[in-house]
Image (tube, grey):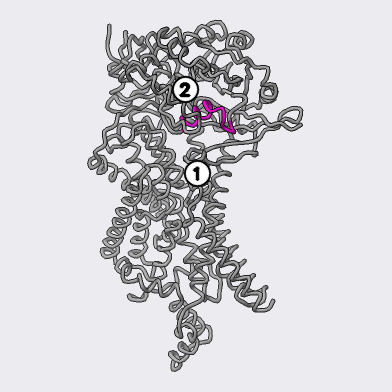
């Protein structure tokens, strides 16, 4: 695997991670599925 | 043809409703929320004969349609709203053969809504034991329904129940009680005003304080005008209605049920003489708690050690097998240790929920409520607060949701506010790793020092919760009427299937809920730790080599120096350095600072973060614990994790409010940002001060 | 002899004669706490509060302050 592919894969992972955290905490969700049950929540 | 039948499972608490649900759906179930509110919604699918499918909703347990809590509101909202997509084609009322009389009250109410209803008489296996015999034919005739005699324990009657559901169109929908007999003038008048409406439905709309947002607004408003009677008058009518329903039930049961009292054995009374005893009751409770903690500590250490070393060698293997590069490093230093940080909690969480669900299922939890009520009331709490406080040892989120059973608002608010002090399972990994670093092994009367420390931390959390409750009780000026009614269900051997499903469900929700966050954060952290701004980071190698040029360093030592220089000047290092002055008096360095900050996403991220930070730049994949033990205090020299800094860190985690999700749920349950913000400020400040004092005294 | 439920002794079995519906939660009535039904004290916590009762076959615990609004006949 050349360094270029390695970098692309790593950046993709970072973008996914950032996107996930961002939507989890900063995007207002529709009232339907906001954090509530212990199913979709970050804390345990 | 595949037609889906909507089935609502309704019943009193402690009737084994969940067992019936599990028997019908098996693992074909999912837990979600009702829109807009945080009441747990359990749904499942059941295959019926002839290819028909049933969509089954397990409604929250309720004693009657006169709701006194949010959970119970859900039941009546669904049953009154014909337009709801979940509106049942058929209601299945689950009753317990031993408490048939009381359970039938709810049944008569459902019947009066003219919904096709099947009656399940559960726990049939206990009939002989209790000397009960039933004339099912008579009961079916006079209750105007079909009955399924079920024993989920022996797996009997489920097939009959399925075929009754499939043939729901054959069920009678005639009602049980004629309301007009209670107060002719009032109810006739009501019926004449709304000739097209069901009278019992109108009556419920008048008496219930329920959100009817979804039903036809005009209709409701019109009924609201009908509240011509005073509150006390309405309540008197409700009492009459209840008496009337019991008359009906007594008449039916007089011929339909015989109880041979001489034959009945009442084990509950005998056990309860001891379990709820003024002295022995408390001793037993304490022993049970002690056993649980010892077990969680001892039993889970073996799988945890195994997981720890497995992930360490997996990291090593990845690094050696894949070609070197950014992504390989991310895998070996960020993702795999991050995943390890999730998996390692599974044993403890599973054990904890195992114990909690066994205590709940067996009926013991109600006895604890009884034993603790008087004591808890001194602190402004209720005996019912004990259930949230004990579930708080798993997670504050379901615990705060469990406060809904507390009818008194002030007691409920205080319970919500103090629950986050209780040691939740997210604190457990932090405690475990620090305890194993700073507390010696050794034993004291058969109990390990380490287990005792853990127990002490649980007690400290509990102590903080009750003492802040005591203060809040004095400070908060809220007037609300107290009432306290707790059923003492019969003791039951917990059903293996129910316990297994709970443990599986909760563990799964941890791995896929919290786990995703931990994984995402560990990826981000790895990037922040592996890159940095400016020349100081870029030229780390040159700078370090120059600095140590006149010292005789082996190449391994030099590599370590370079790595630590890089980390120090990475993004994360810079952030950590910035907050270091604030936390140095507590005995922490900037790496711990980073871990504390990232803990606000979820406490358990602490260990994962340290794992990521430490494995960044280290050549050998030691286990996390060994890496931590090797850390050196930058100011004092010597190991970073000493008795003093360890205790300080333990106390900080015991008191600080470090969970965004909990804050979100508190906001939701108290309908205001005021309470979560108050919690965050006071708890975190208190944690800081206590940790500061502890470190300064012990160092 | 008339008395309130708060003064019942352990093991004693009495008949409920009256409940003050304004002071008693509906839920308690629905669990069987109605005039004519029997009540028995199973166990008490320290300070006689809360009280663990068997009302008409239903086992439940209530606080002493609630019990004071229920009249019984021995």
Main SS, magenta residues: helix
The residue carrying pointer 2 sits among few (fewer than 14), some (14 to 19) or many (20 or more) residues within 10 Å by Cα, namely: many
Q: Which residue is mark 1?
A: A37
Horizontal side of residue B311 vs B439, given as left or right: right
Query: Disc 1 on helix, strand or loop?
Result: loop
Q: Nearer the viewer, residue B46 or B489?
A: B46
Q: Is residue B13 visible?
A: no
Q: Chain of mark 1?
A: A
Residue B28 position, x and y percent, is: 65, 39
The residue carrying pointer 1 sits among few (fewer than 14), some (14 to 19) or many (20 or more) residues within 10 Å by Cα, namely: many
Q: Chain of mark 2?
A: B
Q: Quadrant of residue B83?
A: top right
Q: Which numbered dot is residue B182?
A: none
Q: Is residue B558 above or below residue C54?
A: below
Q: Is residue B684 above or below residue B196?
A: below
Q: Nearer the viewer, residue A4 or B341?
A: A4
The span shown in magenta is B71-86
Total numbered labels: 2
Residue B370 position, x and y percent, is: 37, 29
Q: Quadrant of the N terminus of chain B?
A: top right
Does the CB distance between marks 1 and 2 fall below 8 Å? Answer: no
Q: Which residue is mark 2?
A: B64
Q: Is residue B92 above or below residue B421?
A: above
């Amino acid at each position: 695997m050349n360094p270029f592919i390695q970098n692309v894969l790593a950046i993709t992972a970072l973008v996914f991670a950032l996107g996930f955290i961002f939507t989890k905490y900063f995007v207002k969700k529709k009232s339907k599925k906001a954090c509530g049950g212990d199913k979709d929540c970050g804390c345990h | 043809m595949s037609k889906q039948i909507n089935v609502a499972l309704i019943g009193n608490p402690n009737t084994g409703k969940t067992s019936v649900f599990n028997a019908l759906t098996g693992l074909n179930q999912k837990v979600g929320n009702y829109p807009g509110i945080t009441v747990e919604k359990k749904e499942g699918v059941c295959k019926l004969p002839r290819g028909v499918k049933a969509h089954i909703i397990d409604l929250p347990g309720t004693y009657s349609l006169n709701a006194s809590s949010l959970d119970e509101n859900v039941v009546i909202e669904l049953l009154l709203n014909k337009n709801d997509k979940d509106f049942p084609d058929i209601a299945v009322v689950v009753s317990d053969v031993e408490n048939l009389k009381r359970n039938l009250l709810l049944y008569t109410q459902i019947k009066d809504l003219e919904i096709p209803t099947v009656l399940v008489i559960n726990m049939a296996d206990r009939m002989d034991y209790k000397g009960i015999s039933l004339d099912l034919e008579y009961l079916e005739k006079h209750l105007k329904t079909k009955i399924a005699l079920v024993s989920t324990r022996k797996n009997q009657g489920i097939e009959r129940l399925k075929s009754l559901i499939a043939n729901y169109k054959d069920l009678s929908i005639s009602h049980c009680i004629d309301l007009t007999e209670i107060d002719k003038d009032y109810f006739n008048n009501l019926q004449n005003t709304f000739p097209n409406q069901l009278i019992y439905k109108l009556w419920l709309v008048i008496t219930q304080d329920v959100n009817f947002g979804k039903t036809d607004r005009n209709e409701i408003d019109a009924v609201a005008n009908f509240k011509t009677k005073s509150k006390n008058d309405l309540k008197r009518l409700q009492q009459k209605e209840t008496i009337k329903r019991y008359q009906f039930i007594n008449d039916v049961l007089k011929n339909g049920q015989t109880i041979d009292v001489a034959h009945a054995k009442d084990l509950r009374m005998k056990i309860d003489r001891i379990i709820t005893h003024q002295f022995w009751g408390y001793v037993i409770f304490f022993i049970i708690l002690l056993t649980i903690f010892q077990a969680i500590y001892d039993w889970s250490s073996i799988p945890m050690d195994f997981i720890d070393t497995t992930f360490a060698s997996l990291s090593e293997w990845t690094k050696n097998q894949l070609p070197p590069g950014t992504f390989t490093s991310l895998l070996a230093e960020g993702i795999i240790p991050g995943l390890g940080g999730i998996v390692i909690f599974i044993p403890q969480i599973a054990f904890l929920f195992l114990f909690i669900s066994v205590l709940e299922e067996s009926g013991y939890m109600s006895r604890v409520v009884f034993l603790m009520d008087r004591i808890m009331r001194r602190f402004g709490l209720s005996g019912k607060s004990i259930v949230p406080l004990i579930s708080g040892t798993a997670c504050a989120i379901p615990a705060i949701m469990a406060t809904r059973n507390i009818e008194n608002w002030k007691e409920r608010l205080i319970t919500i506010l103090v629950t986050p002090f209780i040691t939740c399972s997210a604190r457990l990994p932090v405690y475990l790793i620090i305890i194993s670093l700073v507390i010696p092994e050794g034993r004291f009367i058969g109990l390990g020092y380490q287990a005792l420390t853990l127990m002490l931390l649980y007690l400290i959390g509990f102590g903080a919760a009750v003492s802040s409750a005591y203060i809040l009780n004095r400070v908060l000026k809220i007037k609300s009427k107290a009432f306290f009614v707790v059923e003492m269900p019969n003791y039951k051997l917990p059903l293996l299937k129910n316990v297994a499903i709970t443990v599986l469900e909760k563990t799964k929700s941890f791995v896929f809920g919290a786990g995703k966050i931990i994984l995402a954060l560990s990826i981000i952290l790895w990037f922040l730790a592996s890159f940095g701004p400016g020349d100081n980071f870029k030229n780390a190698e040159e700078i370090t080599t120059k600095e140590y040029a006149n010292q005789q360093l082996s190449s391994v030592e030099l590599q370590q120096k370079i790595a630590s220089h890089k980390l120090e000047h990475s993004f994360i290092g810079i952030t950590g350095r910035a907050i270091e002055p604030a936390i140095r008096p507590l005995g922490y360095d900037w790496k711990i600072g980073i871990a504390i900050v990232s803990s606000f996403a979820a406490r358990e991220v602490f260990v994962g973060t340290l794992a990521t930070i430490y494995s960044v730049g280290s050549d050998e994949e030691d286990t996390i614990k060994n890496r931590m033990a090797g850390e050196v205090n930058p100011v004092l020299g010597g190991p970073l994790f000493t008795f003093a800094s360890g205790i300080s860190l333990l106390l900080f985690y015991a008191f600080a409010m470090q969970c965004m999700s909990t804050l979100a749920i508190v906001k939701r349950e108290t309908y205001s940002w005021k309470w979560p913000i108050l919690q965050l400020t006071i708890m975190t400040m208190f944690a800081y001060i206590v940790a500061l004092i502890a470190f300064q005294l012990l160092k | 002899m008339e008395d309130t439920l708060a003064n019942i002794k352990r093991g004693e079995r009495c008949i409920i004669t009256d409940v003050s519906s304004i002071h008693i939660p509906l839920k308690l009535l629905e669990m069987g706490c109605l005039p004519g039904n029997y009540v028995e004290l199973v166990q008490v916590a320290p300070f006689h509060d809360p009280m663990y009762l068997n009302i008409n076959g239903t086992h439940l615990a209530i606080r002493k302050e609630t019990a004071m609004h229920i009249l019984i006949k021995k």
